[in-house]
Image: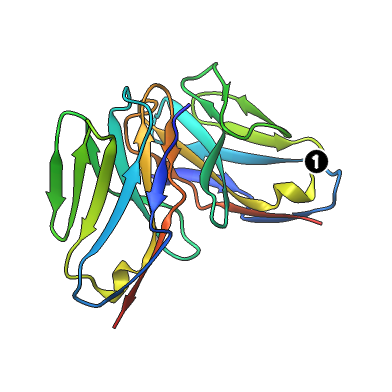
Amino acid sequence: GENVEQHPSTLSVQEGDSAVIKCTYSDSASNYFPWYKQELGKRPQLIIDIRSNVGEKKDQRIAVTLNKTAKHFSLHITETQPEDSAVYFCAVGGYQKVTFGTGTKLQVIP
Amino acid sequence: NAGVTQTPKFQVLKTGQSMTLQCAQDMNHNSMYWYRQDPGMGLRLIYYSASEGTTDKGEVPNGYNVSRLNKREFSLRLESAAPSQTSVYFCASSKVEGNTEAFFGQGTRLTVV
Protein backbone atom coordinates (compact mmCIF):
# COMPACT_ATOMS: atom_id res chain seq x y z
CA GLY A 1 0.00 0.00 0.00
CA GLU A 2 0.85 3.68 -0.04
CA ASN A 3 3.52 4.91 2.38
CA VAL A 4 3.49 8.61 3.25
CA GLU A 5 6.27 10.24 5.27
CA GLN A 6 5.94 13.76 6.63
CA HIS A 7 8.64 16.03 8.07
CA PRO A 8 9.22 17.72 10.40
CA SER A 9 6.96 16.46 13.18
CA THR A 10 7.18 19.82 14.98
CA LEU A 11 8.05 23.26 13.67
CA SER A 12 8.38 26.57 15.49
CA VAL A 13 8.66 29.83 13.57
CA GLN A 14 8.55 33.50 14.44
CA GLU A 15 5.48 35.40 13.33
CA GLY A 16 6.05 36.73 9.83
CA ASP A 17 8.53 34.01 8.87
CA SER A 18 7.83 31.23 6.38
CA ALA A 19 7.12 27.60 7.20
CA VAL A 20 7.73 24.60 4.95
CA ILE A 21 6.44 21.07 5.50
CA LYS A 22 7.50 18.19 3.26
CA CYS A 23 5.97 14.84 2.39
CA THR A 24 7.15 11.90 0.35
CA TYR A 25 5.05 9.04 -1.00
CA SER A 26 5.71 5.65 -2.54
CA ASP A 27 3.00 4.86 -5.10
CA SER A 28 3.68 6.50 -8.46
CA ALA A 29 0.02 5.94 -9.44
CA SER A 30 -1.19 8.39 -6.77
CA ASN A 31 -2.75 11.47 -8.29
CA TYR A 32 -4.25 13.66 -5.56
CA PHE A 33 -2.30 15.53 -2.88
CA PRO A 34 -4.34 17.48 -0.31
CA TRP A 35 -3.24 19.29 2.83
CA TYR A 36 -5.42 19.46 5.93
CA LYS A 37 -5.23 21.76 8.95
CA GLN A 38 -6.42 20.59 12.34
CA GLU A 39 -6.80 23.10 15.14
CA LEU A 40 -6.74 21.86 18.71
CA GLY A 41 -9.84 19.82 19.50
CA LYS A 42 -11.30 20.32 16.03
CA ARG A 43 -11.75 18.22 12.92
CA PRO A 44 -9.25 18.27 10.03
CA GLN A 45 -10.20 20.65 7.24
CA LEU A 46 -8.82 20.97 3.72
CA ILE A 47 -6.70 24.06 3.12
CA ILE A 48 -5.26 23.35 -0.33
CA ASP A 49 -4.88 20.47 -2.75
CA ILE A 50 -3.05 19.72 -5.96
CA ARG A 51 -3.43 17.12 -8.66
CA SER A 52 -0.72 15.23 -10.48
CA ASN A 53 -0.97 17.26 -13.67
CA VAL A 54 -0.04 20.48 -11.86
CA GLY A 55 3.36 21.39 -10.40
CA GLU A 56 2.38 24.27 -8.13
CA LYS A 57 -0.73 25.88 -6.71
CA LYS A 58 -1.08 29.00 -4.62
CA ASP A 59 -3.88 30.43 -2.49
CA GLN A 60 -2.98 33.70 -0.78
CA ARG A 61 -0.31 32.86 1.83
CA ILE A 62 -0.24 29.13 1.24
CA ALA A 63 1.21 27.19 -1.67
CA VAL A 64 1.83 23.58 -2.52
CA THR A 65 4.50 22.25 -4.87
CA LEU A 66 4.61 18.76 -6.35
CA ASN A 67 7.52 16.85 -7.83
CA LYS A 68 6.03 13.68 -9.30
CA THR A 69 9.37 12.34 -10.51
CA ALA A 70 10.85 12.47 -7.04
CA LYS A 71 7.52 11.62 -5.39
CA HIS A 72 7.48 14.48 -2.95
CA PHE A 73 5.33 17.54 -2.31
CA SER A 74 5.55 20.46 0.07
CA LEU A 75 3.34 22.99 1.83
CA HIS A 76 4.64 26.55 2.04
CA ILE A 77 3.11 29.13 4.38
CA THR A 78 4.41 32.66 4.05
CA GLU A 79 4.04 35.58 6.49
CA THR A 80 2.93 33.23 9.24
CA GLN A 81 0.43 34.45 11.81
CA PRO A 82 -0.48 33.09 15.28
CA GLU A 83 -3.73 31.66 13.87
CA ASP A 84 -1.64 29.41 11.60
CA SER A 85 -0.65 27.44 14.72
CA ALA A 86 -2.17 23.97 14.26
CA VAL A 87 -1.35 20.44 13.15
CA TYR A 88 -0.98 20.04 9.39
CA PHE A 89 -1.45 16.75 7.60
CA CYS A 90 -0.42 15.90 4.09
CA ALA A 91 -2.33 13.17 2.31
CA VAL A 92 -2.01 11.13 -0.84
CA GLY A 93 -5.00 9.97 -2.83
CA GLY A 94 -5.29 7.31 -5.42
CA TYR A 95 -7.58 4.42 -6.18
CA GLN A 96 -10.38 4.34 -3.61
CA LYS A 97 -8.68 5.83 -0.59
CA VAL A 98 -6.51 8.55 0.89
CA THR A 99 -3.45 7.89 3.07
CA PHE A 100 -2.41 10.55 5.58
CA GLY A 101 1.00 11.58 6.84
CA THR A 102 1.72 11.61 10.56
CA GLY A 103 1.26 15.35 10.95
CA THR A 104 3.34 18.46 11.68
CA LYS A 105 2.63 20.58 14.72
CA LEU A 106 3.29 24.18 13.71
CA GLN A 107 3.76 26.80 16.39
CA VAL A 108 3.90 30.45 15.36
CA ILE A 109 5.54 32.54 18.05
CA PRO A 110 4.24 36.12 18.28
CA ASN B 1 -26.77 21.31 5.62
CA ALA B 2 -24.98 19.63 8.53
CA GLY B 3 -22.17 17.95 6.55
CA VAL B 4 -20.86 14.90 8.41
CA THR B 5 -22.38 14.12 11.78
CA GLN B 6 -21.05 11.45 14.08
CA THR B 7 -22.22 10.31 17.48
CA PRO B 8 -21.41 10.10 20.30
CA LYS B 9 -18.85 12.84 20.95
CA PHE B 10 -17.39 11.16 24.03
CA GLN B 11 -17.59 7.58 25.32
CA VAL B 12 -16.01 5.57 28.10
CA LEU B 13 -16.16 1.79 27.83
CA LYS B 14 -15.00 -1.02 30.01
CA THR B 15 -12.76 -3.67 28.48
CA GLY B 16 -14.91 -6.23 26.70
CA GLN B 17 -17.92 -3.99 26.18
CA SER B 18 -19.27 -3.35 22.71
CA MET B 19 -20.48 -0.18 21.05
CA THR B 20 -21.35 1.30 17.69
CA LEU B 21 -20.23 4.69 16.44
CA GLN B 22 -22.72 6.28 14.09
CA CYS B 23 -21.93 8.50 11.13
CA ALA B 24 -24.20 10.21 8.62
CA GLN B 25 -23.57 12.66 5.78
CA ASP B 26 -26.03 14.81 3.90
CA MET B 27 -23.83 15.78 0.95
CA ASN B 28 -24.81 12.85 -1.29
CA HIS B 29 -21.23 11.60 -1.20
CA ASN B 30 -20.40 8.17 -2.54
CA SER B 31 -17.43 7.33 -0.33
CA MET B 32 -17.19 7.17 3.46
CA TYR B 33 -14.30 6.41 5.79
CA TRP B 34 -13.45 5.68 9.40
CA TYR B 35 -10.10 6.86 10.78
CA ARG B 36 -8.51 6.71 14.18
CA GLN B 37 -6.15 9.40 15.42
CA ASP B 38 -3.46 8.68 17.97
CA PRO B 39 -0.68 11.05 19.09
CA GLY B 40 2.22 10.97 16.64
CA MET B 41 0.45 8.48 14.36
CA GLY B 42 -1.59 10.76 12.19
CA LEU B 43 -4.90 9.56 10.81
CA ARG B 44 -4.98 5.83 10.16
CA LEU B 45 -7.68 4.31 8.00
CA ILE B 46 -9.74 1.60 9.69
CA TYR B 47 -12.33 0.81 7.02
CA TYR B 48 -13.75 2.54 4.02
CA SER B 49 -16.74 2.27 1.73
CA ALA B 50 -16.07 3.42 -1.81
CA SER B 51 -19.75 3.28 -2.66
CA GLU B 52 -23.04 2.12 -1.20
CA GLY B 53 -23.00 -1.62 -0.75
CA THR B 54 -19.22 -2.03 -0.56
CA THR B 55 -16.77 -1.97 2.34
CA ASP B 56 -13.05 -2.66 2.50
CA LYS B 57 -10.36 -2.91 5.12
CA GLY B 58 -7.94 -0.10 5.62
CA GLU B 59 -4.64 0.00 7.45
CA VAL B 60 -5.82 -1.01 10.96
CA PRO B 61 -9.08 -3.04 10.71
CA ASN B 62 -8.50 -5.59 13.48
CA GLY B 63 -11.09 -5.40 16.26
CA TYR B 64 -13.58 -3.39 14.19
CA ASN B 65 -16.52 -4.02 11.88
CA VAL B 66 -18.46 -1.63 9.69
CA SER B 67 -21.83 -1.38 8.01
CA ARG B 68 -22.73 0.89 5.12
CA LEU B 69 -26.41 1.05 5.98
CA ASN B 70 -27.33 3.22 3.00
CA LYS B 71 -25.71 6.01 1.03
CA ARG B 72 -25.90 8.41 3.99
CA GLU B 73 -24.84 6.22 6.91
CA PHE B 74 -21.67 4.33 7.78
CA SER B 75 -21.31 2.81 11.24
CA LEU B 76 -18.27 1.45 13.08
CA ARG B 77 -18.67 -1.32 15.64
CA LEU B 78 -16.30 -2.42 18.37
CA GLU B 79 -17.40 -5.92 19.38
CA SER B 80 -15.14 -6.33 22.43
CA ALA B 81 -13.35 -3.12 23.32
CA ALA B 82 -9.69 -3.20 24.37
CA PRO B 83 -7.55 -0.45 25.94
CA SER B 84 -5.55 -0.30 22.67
CA GLN B 85 -8.68 1.06 21.02
CA THR B 86 -8.58 4.19 23.14
CA SER B 87 -8.37 6.89 20.50
CA VAL B 88 -10.16 9.70 18.71
CA TYR B 89 -12.28 8.37 15.87
CA PHE B 90 -13.21 10.40 12.81
CA CYS B 91 -15.74 9.60 10.16
CA ALA B 92 -15.26 11.27 6.78
CA SER B 93 -16.92 11.34 3.40
CA SER B 94 -15.94 12.36 -0.12
CA LYS B 95 -17.73 12.71 -3.41
CA VAL B 96 -15.45 10.28 -5.20
CA GLU B 97 -13.14 7.78 -3.59
CA GLY B 98 -9.51 8.68 -3.22
CA ASN B 99 -9.16 11.91 -5.12
CA THR B 100 -11.59 14.51 -3.86
CA GLU B 101 -11.81 16.53 -0.68
CA ALA B 102 -12.70 14.59 2.45
CA PHE B 103 -15.12 16.18 4.90
CA PHE B 104 -14.76 15.08 8.50
CA GLY B 105 -17.17 14.67 11.37
CA GLN B 106 -16.42 16.31 14.70
CA GLY B 107 -14.78 13.19 16.13
CA THR B 108 -15.51 10.73 18.95
CA ARG B 109 -13.14 10.55 21.89
CA LEU B 110 -13.26 6.95 23.09
CA THR B 111 -11.60 5.73 26.27
CA VAL B 112 -11.46 2.04 27.11
CA VAL B 113 -10.63 1.28 30.73
Give the residue at the far bottom of this rendering: A110
The quadrant of the rendering that contains the C terminus of chain A is bottom left
Among the 4 quarters of the image, the one containing residue B26: top left
Residue at coordinates 47% horizontally, 39% vertically from top-left? B92
Which type of secondary structure does the marked residue at label 1 adopt? loop
Q: Residues within 10 Å of mark 1 (few under 14, many from 20)?
A: few
Q: Position of residue A3 (x, y in %)?
A: 45, 35
Q: Position of residue B81 (x, y in %)?
A: 79, 43
| Residue nearest the viewer, comparing B75 with A12 | A12
Q: Position of residue B47 (x, y in %)?
A: 58, 30
| Residue nearest the viewer, comparing A22 with B37 | A22
Q: Is residue B19 left or right of residue B1?
A: right
Q: Position of residue B43 (x, y in %)?
A: 51, 46
Give the residue at the far front of this rendering: A70
| Residue nearest the viewer, comparing B19 with A10 | A10
Residue at coordinates 74% horizontally, 48% vertically from top-left? B84
| Residue nearest the viewer, comparing A75 with B32 | A75
Q: Kindly identify which residue carries mark 1.
A: B18
Residue at coordinates 25% horizontally, 48% vertically from top-left? A74
